[in-house]
Amino acid sequence: MKVDTFFKLSDVFLEDCKNIQIEKGREYTIDDGTGKADKFANFRSIGQRMDLDPKMVLMIYMLKHMDSIRTYVLYGKEGSEGLKGRCQDLVNYAIMLYLLDHEEKAFEDLTQDA
């Protein structure tokens, strides 16, 4: 694949990732009606109920997609979302994992100064 084609397709793929974040975010973000919904509330909620760190919950979600991708790579069988959808979900979960960790570290920095 030529480099310019790679980056054009990457741009489309990542734009689709962002659209998926918006669409699926509405379904999974727990909104209390204040307009200040916590993007990570579902991971925190499940973590509390299962006695797991929210990052671990997020990692479990990522592994579900990795298992589907692995099945495709090993056996050529696509699941219900297809390879593209699984890869896009994985990218989005990786972004969320990074930002959840960033949020926690930023909070730690704030509390250490107090």
Image (cartoon, rainbow, N blue to C red):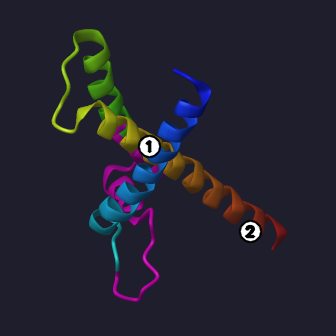
Give the residue number, with chain letter if any, for mark 2: 111
> Which of 112 and 33 lies nearest the eye of the viewer?
33
Query: Residue 19: horizontal and vertical position, in percent?
Result: 39, 59
> Which of 83 and 27 lies nearest the eye of the viewer?
83
Q: Outermost residue, right direction?
A: 113
Give the residue number, with chain letter if any, for mark 1: 13
Please name the predominant secondary structure of the magenta segment in the image: helix
Q: Residue at x 42, y 50 (%)?
A: 17
Of the two numbered discs 1 and 2 on the same chain, state the one appearing first in sequence.
1
SS assignment at label 2: helix
> In the image, what residue type sits under mark 2?
Thr
Is 44 magenta? The answer is: yes
Query: Residue 33: horizontal and vertical position, in percent?
Result: 34, 87
Q: Residue at x 47, y 38 (%)?
A: 9
Q: Check contact, mark 1 vs mark 2: CB within 8 A.
A: no
> In the image, what residue type sits under mark 1?
Phe
**Residue 51 makes an appearance in the image:** yes
Q: Residue at x 27, y 65 (%)?
A: 27
Query: Residue 100: horizontal and vertical position, in percent?
Result: 55, 55
Image-based side of 30 in relation to 103, left or right: left
On screen, residue 51 above or below 109: above
On screen, residue 108 above or below 94: below
Q: Nearer the viewer, mark 1 or mark 2?
A: 1
Disc marking residue 104: none
Dot 1 alpha-carbon crowd within 10 angstroms: few under 14, some 14 to 19, many 20 or more: some
Query: Residue 60: horizontal and vertical position, in percent?
Result: 36, 38
Which stretch appears magenta? 32-61
Is 50 magenta? The answer is: yes
